[in-house]
Image (cartoon, grey):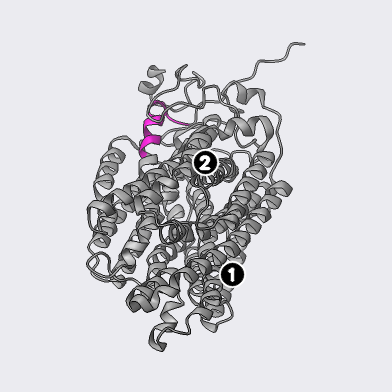
């Protein structure tokens, strides 16, 4: 008896949207790029902002950290809420709101008159970014069919590498020719371009059956995340996690988040279904995201001081030295799905984590005369490792949730990334700070008592005091370099250990290589029932959740190198059967 031929599923993405999916991805990448670009520019500008006016605004080490942390606090606190609102109110609307607020915050930050104003306006930028980042990934999941999602996510992740590449270089050029505020003002024209392209190209989509907004769940998530992240940041600022001003918000935040989980498990309309966290692959993926950013963010913070203060490179030169990290991400991230197809997510992500750990541990060998080629190799290894971690784990998170919950899935992905990054800056920053102070204090005996405490804050503070003391301060310069290098070595080892923990997590819980589904190889999905389209061009009929067991990085028919904004060779490979209820005009186009 002959077997019936496989039946292709009706396409879940409307034809008009499917045809411009690569152009839409280009717009999403531009939106993501400007958000990441801003933070990568800031990393090379911290030394300039710390300088006295008119070169900078005389920000202290603590104020510099809060210019980063105020952004992180608002960003992390609202990520989950913004993803939820995108699913309900429309992802395009949320994306437009976020990029507009981000642009306004950038313009205000550019003309900050004091460190306090800069901290406040960076918080505004964090508010806007919280609505941008989850929406970009949620829109992506709704304009690409499932078989193309791993490829699209790889390209999307590659835009992060592009931002890392051009951010420091752009920052260095701007700081050499303009005032420090230009690093924020440069965002404004890009934001205006992104707004115009979004209005023109990006389709709106939302959950067709959102249910009631879980207001108690939303409030609990915001309060819990804000308290937790604030406590972590405060601990980094004090270089101590036993102070009551640290323990109170951390314990309070954890308690509120426990209440959030209990509420979500009992709610008949939860903001996020907690059952997803019982899936080992999903839980391991979000844990890997948190751990890798925990390890990397602390190192990112001190690498600018190593390159500029210890090695003497300019902001532009520092940006160029970090370029291999970004190039590796741009090259490997869009192709990571091909490696996952062959070896499985477990092997690829574990290898990526080990590469990152090796790159971090290498900082423990750096000194004031390490050859430039060694720096370049280490940065390239770190970028290659990241490129083989982020796309597979992002695919694992996003494909575990149904398409209509893409905003919530993206928010979970980004929330764990931000909390992990905040912990990295705080915990590893406190390791760096306390180790540096312990090393330099023995050399501060000849410093006037009024300046002694300030001189021990950071290498920049020590060098500033040495310059103020004139010839009497020359004896502080060499000890400051040695103390910073010792502190950097300790912090690098701690970072590498965190990355090794991440490698153990993904090796234990991520799925291995999954046999290819013949239907997926043909570019089809299992028949899951009819899909209908509403006036906005989004799926509005009942659509079952995508299976969580599909291998991240499922094979696609087209090549990995397709440029955003172009239709891959071979044209539209989707089924030619129109979805029941589709408009006649759309059927005719097929």
Quarter of the image where one finds residue 521? top right
Please state if 5 lies on the left or on the right of 459 as rendered.
Answer: right
Q: Measuring 62% from the left and 43% from the top, which residue is drawn there? A: 352
Within the magenta stretch, is there residue 14?
A: yes
Left-right relation of 316 to 490: left
Q: Residue furthest front?
A: 471
| Span highlighted in magenta in the image | 13-27
* Residue assigned mark 1: 259
x and y, in percent, of residue 31 in the image: 36, 45
Q: Which mark is residue 51?
A: none
Q: Position of residue 154 (x, y in %)?
A: 51, 37
State the residue lying farthest toward the top. Answer: 1
Residue sitting at x 42%, y 29%: 14
Tell whether 508 sits left or right of 489: right
Q: CA distance from mark 2 to mark 1?
A: 27 Å
Secondary structure mostly seen in the magenta stretch:
helix
- Identify which residue, 354 or 175, lies in the foreground: 175
Q: Nearer the viewer, residue 60 or 97?
A: 60
Q: Is 33 placed above or below 571 here? A: below
Which residue is at the front of the view, 432 or 341?
432
- Crowding around mark 1 (Cα neighbors within 10 Å: few <14, some 14 to 19, many 20+) is some
Which label's residue is closer to the chain start, 2 or 1? 1
Up the image or down, 489 lies above or below 413; here it is below
The residue where tag 2 is placed is 403
User: Judging from the image, what secondary structure is the residue with disc 1 in?
Assistant: helix
Q: Residue 317 placed where, x, y %? A: 38, 49
Residue closest to the eye, 372 or 110: 372
Question: Can you say which quadrant of the picture contains the N terminus?
Answer: top right
């Amino acid at each position: 008896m002959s077997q019936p031929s496989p039946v292709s599923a009706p396409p879940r993405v409307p034809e008009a949207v499917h045809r411009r999916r690569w152009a839409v991805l280009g717009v999403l990448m531009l939106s993501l790029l400007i958000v990441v670009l801003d933070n990568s520019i800031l990393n090379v500008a911290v030394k300039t902002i710390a300088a006295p006016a008119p070169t900078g605004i005389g920000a202290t080490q603590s104020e510099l950290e809060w210019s980063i942390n105020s952004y992180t606090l608002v960003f992390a606190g609202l990520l989950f809420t913004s993803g939820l609102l995108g699913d309900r109110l429309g992802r395009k609307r949320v994306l437009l709101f976020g990029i507009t607020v981000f642009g306004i915050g950038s313009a205000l930050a550019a003309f900050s008159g004091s460190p306090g104003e800069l901290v406040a306006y960076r918080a505004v930028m964090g508010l806007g970014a919280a609505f941008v980042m989850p929406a970009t990934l949620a829109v992506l999941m709704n304009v690409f069919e499932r078989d193309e999602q791993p490829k699209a996510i790889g390209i999307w992740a590659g835009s992060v590498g592009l931002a890392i590449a051009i951010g420091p270089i752009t920052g260095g050029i701007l700081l050499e020719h303009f005032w420090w505020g230009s690093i924020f003002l440069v965002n404004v024209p890009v934001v205006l371009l992104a707004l115009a392209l979004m209005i023109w190209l990006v389709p709106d989509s939302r959950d067709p059956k959102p249910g009631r907004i879980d207001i108690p769940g939303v409030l609990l998530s915001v309060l819990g995340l804000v308290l937790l992240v604030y406590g972590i940041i405060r601990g980094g600022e004090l270089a101590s996690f036993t102070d009551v001003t640290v323990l109170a918000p951390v314990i309070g935040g954890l308690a509120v988040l426990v209440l959030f989980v209990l509420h979500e498990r009992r709610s008949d309309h939860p903001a996020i279904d907690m059952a997803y966290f019982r899936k080992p692959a999903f839980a391991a993926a979000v844990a890997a995201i948190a751990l890798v950013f925990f390890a990397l963010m602390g190192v990112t913070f001190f690498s600018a001081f190593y390159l500029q203060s210890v090695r003497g490179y300019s902001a532009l030169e520092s940006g160029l030295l970090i370029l291999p990290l970004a190039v590796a991400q741009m090259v490997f991230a869009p192709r990571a799905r091909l490696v996952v197809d062959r070896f499985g997510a477990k092997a690829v992500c574990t290898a990526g984590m080990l590469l990152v750990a090796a790159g971090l541990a290498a900082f423990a060998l750096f000194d004031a005369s390490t050859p430039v080629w060694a720096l370049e190799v280490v940065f390239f290894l770190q970028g290659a490792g990241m490129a083989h971690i982020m796309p597979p784990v992002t695919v694992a998170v996003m494909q575990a949730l149904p398409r209509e919950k893409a905003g919530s899935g993206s928010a979970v992905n980004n929330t764990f990334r931000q909390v992990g990054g905040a912990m990295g800056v705080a915990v590893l920053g406190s390791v760096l700070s306390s180790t540096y102070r312990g090393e330099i204090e023995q050399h501060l005996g000849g410093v006037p008592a009024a300046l002694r405490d300030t001189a021990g804050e950071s290498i920049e503070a020590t060098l500033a005091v040495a310059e103020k003391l004139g010839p009497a301060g020359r004896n502080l310069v060499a000890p400051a370099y040695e103390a910073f290098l010792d502190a950097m070595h300790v912090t690098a080892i701690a970072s590498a250990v965190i990355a090794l923990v991440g490698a153990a997590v993904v090796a234990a819980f991520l799925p291995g290589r999954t046999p290819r589904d013949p239907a997926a190889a043909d570019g089809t999905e299992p028949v899951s029932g009819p899909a209908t389209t509403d006036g906005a061009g989004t799926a509005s009929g009942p659509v079952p959740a995508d299976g969580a067991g599909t291998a991240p990085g499922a094979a696609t028919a087209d090549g990995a190198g397709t440029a955003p904004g172009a239709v891959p060779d071979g044209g539209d490979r989707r089924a030619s059967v129109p979805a029941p209820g589709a408009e006649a005009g759309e059927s005719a186009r097929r």
